[in-house]
C-alpha cells in the first residue's frame, strides 16, 4: 500500500509525518537555538497529547517537554514515561491568568485539549499571541479553525507562527492533498477539478472519550461541501460510499461529515469540488451514528454538556469494542483533473494513537525549525515536497 510521507516546509527536511508500520522513526536535528526549546502540550495526559509528547521526545530527545493538564496523577505518570527532560504543569485553559503565566515560560504550545466543536473562543491562541508564544493545534472543527485563521494579522504583529488543524486528519491529509494538487499542476495539462477525502478508523482509534465527543458533536453540524465552486449543505452521516482503502483494511463504508479541510482545500488549493467522508467499524457503529443523526435533534447534538453525558454512557461499551476492533486508521485522498487524470494517495497505520502523535509532532517541529513564517496557517498553505 502506498504511504505518502511528506516534508512540511520548504526549508531543510523536517521529518516524515508518519513512518511506515514497524519502521524506526529517526531523530530530527533542530537548529542550535531551538534544540532545547520548552514545549507545552495542553491535554498532554490525554491520548492525542500523550502520543504527541512521546513522539517529540523520541524525535528530539533534547526538547524539554511540559505536560499540561488538570490531573496531577496522570501528569506524573506521563512524566515518568518521558524521563528527565519532562515536567508536569497544572493548566486549565479556562483559567486565563494561569494559562498566560504558563505560556510565558515556554517556546511553543501544542493545543490537543479538545473537543474543539462548539468552542466559542480561541482562548489558547489568543493567549499565545499575547505572550508571543508559537502555537499549533489539532483542531478538527471548521468554525474553530477559521476563527483561528482570523487572528492572522495579530499573529503577524506578534511575530509568532501558528498552525491550526495540524494533526493527522485534518493535518497530514491536507498535506497529502496539497502534494497531489502540486504534482497534477506540474505534470498534467488539465486543472484539478474534484478532491475527495476519505477516512477510516476502527472503533474510536484508541483515542478515548474526546474522539467520541467530537464524533457526536459533528453529527449536529450540517455538512459543507463544494460542487463546481458552489458551496452546498447536506445532512451529516449521509451520502454513503464504499471505498477501497487497500491491503489490510479493504473496502469500507464512509459517510459525509463537516470537516475543516474541505473549506481550506477549496480556498487554498483552488479545487472547485471538495468533500470529506468518514467511516468506522464494527459496522454497527455506523448504524448507530446514522440513527443518532436521524433520531436526535441537531440542537441536542450541538450541546456539549448533553453530548458529554452521552459519552459517559457509551464510553465503557466503546472501550470494550475497541479491544476487539483494534485501532487501524487509513486516509485516502482522491484527485480528479479536467483532462481525465486521476491520482490517489493512501496512508494506513495499525494504530491511530501512535500515528496521530507522530503527525502532530511533525507540525510542532515545522514550527521549531524556524521555517514557518509568523501568522496563522492551515497545513496546505505550506509548500510541500516529497
Image (cartoon, rainbow, N blue to C red):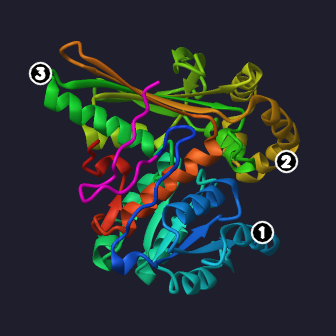
- Dot 2 or dot 3: first in sequence order is 3
Label 3 SS: loop
Q: Earlier in the sequence, mark 3 or mark 1?
A: 1
Label 2, label 3: how far apart the Cα atoms are: 53 Å
Residue of label 2: 312
Exactly how many numbered labels are in the figure?
3
Give 343 or 1, whichever is nearer the viewer.
Answer: 1
* Residue linked to disc 1: 77
Comes first in the chain, label 2 or label 1: 1
Camera-near label (2 vs 1) is 1
Residue drawn at 29 percent across, 32 percent down:
180
Counting from the top left corner in percent of width and height, residue 206 is at 71, 43
State the image coordinates of residue 169 (x, y, percent, origin top left). 50, 42
Q: Is the magenta region chiefly helix, strand or loop?
A: loop
Q: Between residue 303 and residue 341, name the one nearer to us.
A: 341
Residue found 37% across the figure and 69% down from its top = 30
Q: Is residue 53 above or below residue 223?
A: below
Range drawn in magenta: 1-17
Does the magenta-highlighted stretch encompass residue 9?
Answer: yes
Would you place residue 248 above or below residue 86 in this image?
above
Mark 2, secondary structure of its residue: helix
Query: Closer to the camera: disc 2 or disc 3?
Result: 3
Q: Is residue 11 magenta?
A: yes
Which tag is nearer the camera, tag 3 or tag 1? 1
Q: In the picture, which quadrant includes the C terminus?
A: top left
**Which residue is disc 3 drawn over?**
189
Q: Classify 10 Å Cα crowding around label 2: few (below 14), some (14-19), many (20 and above).
A: few
Instruction: Give the Cα distance between marks 3 and 1.
Output: 55 Å
Amino acid at each position: 500500500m502506498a504511504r505518502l510521507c511528506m516534508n512540511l516546509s520548504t526549508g531543510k527536511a523536517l521529518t516524515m509525518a508518519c513512518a511506515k508500520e514497524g519502521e524506526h522513526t529517526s531523530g530530527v536535528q533542530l537548529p542550535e537555538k531551538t534544540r532545547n526549546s520548552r514545549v507545552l502540550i495542553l491535554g498532554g495526559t490525554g491520548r492525542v497529547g500523550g502520543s504527541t509528547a512521546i513522539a517529540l521526545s523520541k524525535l528530539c530527545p533534547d526538547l524539554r517537554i511540559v505536560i499540561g493538564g488538570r490531573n496531577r496523577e496522570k501528569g506524573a505518570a506521563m512524566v515518568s514515561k518521558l524521563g528527565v527532560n519532562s515536567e508536569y504543569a497544572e493548566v486549565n485553559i479556562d483559567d486565563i491568568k494561569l494559562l498566560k503565566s504558563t505560556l510565558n515560560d515556554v517556546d511553543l504550545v501544542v493545543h490537543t485539549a479538545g473537543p474543539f466543536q462548539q468552542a466559542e473562543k480561541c482562548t489558547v491562541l489568543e493567549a499565545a499571541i499575547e505572550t508571543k508564544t508559537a502555537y499549533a493545534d489539532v483542531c478538527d472543527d471548521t468554525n474553530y479553525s477559521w476563527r483561528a485563521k482570523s487572528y492572522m494579522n495579530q499573529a503577524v504583529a506578534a511575530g509568532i507562527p501558528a498552525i491550526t488543524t495540524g494533526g493527522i486528519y485534518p493535518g497530514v491529509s491536507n498535506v497529502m492533498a496539497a502534494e497531489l494538487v502540486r504534482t497534477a499542476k506540474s505534470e498534467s495539462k488539465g486543472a484539478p477539478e474534484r478532491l475527495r477525502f476519505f477516512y477510516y478508523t476502527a472503533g474510536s482509534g484508541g483515542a478515548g472519550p474526546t474522539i467520541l465527543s467530537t464524533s457526536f458533536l459533528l453529527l449536529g453540524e450540517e455538512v459543507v461541501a463544494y460542487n463546481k465552486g458552489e458551496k452546498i449543505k447536506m445532512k451529516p452521516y449521509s451520502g454513503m460510499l464504499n471505498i477501497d482503502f487497500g491491503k489490510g483494511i479493504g473496502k469500507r463504508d464512509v459517510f459525509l461529515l463537516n470537516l475543516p479541510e474541505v473549506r481550506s482545500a477549496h480556498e487554498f488549493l483552488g479545487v472547485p469540488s471538495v468533500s470529506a467522508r468518514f467511516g468506522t467499524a464494527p459496522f454497527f457503529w455506523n448504524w448507530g451514528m446514522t440513527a443518532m443523526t436521524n433520531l436526535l435533534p441537531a440542537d441536542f447534538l450541538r450541546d456539549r454538556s448533553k453530548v458529554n453525558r452521552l459519552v459517559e454512557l457509551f464510553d465503557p461499551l466503546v472501550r470494550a469494542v475497541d479491544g476487539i476492533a483494534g485501532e487501524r486508521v487509513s486516509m485516502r485522498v482522491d484527485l480528479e483533473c479536467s483532462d481525465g487524470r486521476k491520482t490517489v494517495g493512501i496512508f494506513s497505520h495499525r494504530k491511530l494513537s501512535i500515528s496521530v502523535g507522530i503527525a502532530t509532532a511533525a507540525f510542532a517541529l515545522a514550527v521549531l525549525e524556524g521555517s514557518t513564517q509568523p501568522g496563522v496557517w492551515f497545513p496546505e498553505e505550506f509548500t510541500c515536497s516529497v
